[in-house]
Image (cartoon, rainbow, N blue to C red):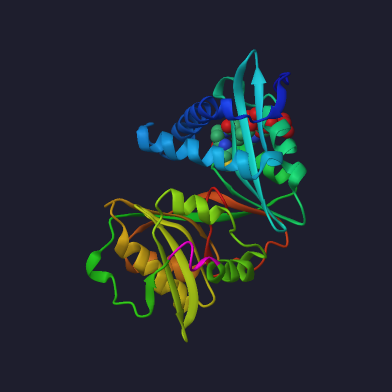
Amino acid sequence: MAEQIAVEIRPLAAADVEQAWEMSHTSLQTAGLEYGWHMPDADALLRSRGHQRIRHLMTQDPEGTWVAELDGEIVGVAAATRRGPLWFLSLLTVATSVQSRGVGRQLLEASMRTLGPAGAICASDDPKALRRYRVAGFELQPRYEAKGPVERAAIPAVDGVRPGSYDNDRDFVDDIATGLRNAPHGVDLDFFAATDRPLYVMDTSAGRGYVACTEKGVAVLGATTTAAARSLLWTALAECTDDDVSILWLRHDQSWAIDVALEARLSLRPTGSFCTRGAVGPMSPYIPNGAFG
Ligand SMILES: CC(C)(COP(=O)(O)OP(=O)(O)OC[C@H]1O[C@@H](n2cnc3c(N)ncnc32)[C@H](O)[C@@H]1OP(=O)(O)O)[C@@H](O)C(=O)NCCC(=O)NCCS
């Protein structure tokens, strides 16, 4: 075991946002080279969305959002949300130069002060993260990423899906989300709205559901039936503006989504783990968001 390092663990402040994001991005990019994921270089859009995300976490979940400081530098960040009973670890990164010296453990412990009856984490492939989460009592479940260009000719006509509104459809979305994960998305819907994630909803006899889209796929998707979930996932694939689609967080038990990905001729790759502790709800049919659960 490497020697532990003494750092100050303190709440993240507004003045820390930019440095915290740069450190996190570099840490994730460096770890990705070692453990096999791709983190794009920082550009203006990535920076601006990253800063927005950290500000959102700091504002909405101040008791779950911490930094580790060493000699005046931020060397670690942890941020956890709490929506109703559901705690979710949004971010945990430590500067590469001080990893494996106990900083991640201290930050995770700080962010877990807001843990209630249930918790979840979309974990990276870093074995240090997996060790920390399992030791903290989380169960690890495999997940897949579906990636590649969508075969446009395979996209079926979909009935009953319409563009949604984060204002007008908020209660509808949160009602379905609560059935799936015992917790609404709540203020995280404001983040999706502020970061221009198009929303689609479906409310028919075949089922009810919602999907927030990204350029490359899905920000979050939830439904009451797999039929509705399939229609919403096809809608998101049809709406992708990036040729290189990436649907993250396909859990091993979400065969309805894995089937759509295969029908769209995307490639499946096992990567990362979905970690849960306590009763997180059925979360099915569901594709979680990596930052907000
Ligand atoms: C994951 C991360 C936050 C953990 O922080 P950290 O400060 O390195 O973690 P800690 O030192 O507290 O704990 C790491 C544990 O893994 C162990 N470890 C180190 N290398 C390991 C390896 N290759 N395989 C398995 N375990 C390993 C350490 O010994 C330690 O366990 P111990 O405390 O029981 O001895 C940090 O490594 C990191 O930023 N990684 C890159 C970004 C990332 O993937 N973040 C997770 C997002 S979900």
Q: Residue at x 71, y 33 (%)?
A: 105
Marks counted in the figure total 0
Residue 6 placement, left or right of 94? right
Quarter of the picture holding the C terminus: bottom right
**Residue 259: quadrant of the picture:** bottom left
Given the current orientation, which residue lies at the most extreme front position? 168
Whether 44 is among the magenta residues is no
Image quarter hosting the N terminus: top right
Residue closest to the eye, 261 or 43: 43
* Identity of the residue furthest to the top in this view: 71
Examine the image and state in which quarter residue 55 appears. top right
In which quadrant of the rendered view does residue 230 lie?
bottom left
Residue under the point 64% across and 36% down: 78
Q: Who's the residue at 67% across and 39% down the image?
A: 62
Residue 224, above or below 102: below
Q: Is residue 15 depicted above or below 83 in this figure?
A: above
Left or right: where does residue 147 sit relative to residue 250? left
The overriding secondary structure of the stretch rendered in magenta is loop
Ligand 1, seen in the image, is in the quarter at: top right
- Residue 136 rendering spot, x and y as whole percentages: 74, 44
Q: Nearer the viewer, residue 193 or 110?
A: 193
Residue 17 percent location from the top left of the image: 54, 30
Q: Position of residue 210 (x, y in %)?
A: 47, 68
* Residue 67 picture location, percent across and down: 65, 29
Q: Is residue 182 left or right of residue 126?
A: right
Q: Is residue 169 magenta?
A: yes
9 sits to left or right of 157: right
Q: Is residue 281 above or below residue 28?
A: below
What is the span of residues highlighted in magenta in the rendered image? 165-170
Residue drawn at the location 70% of the way across and 37% of the way down: 108
Name the outermost residue toward the left.
153
Depth order, front residue of 80/12: 12
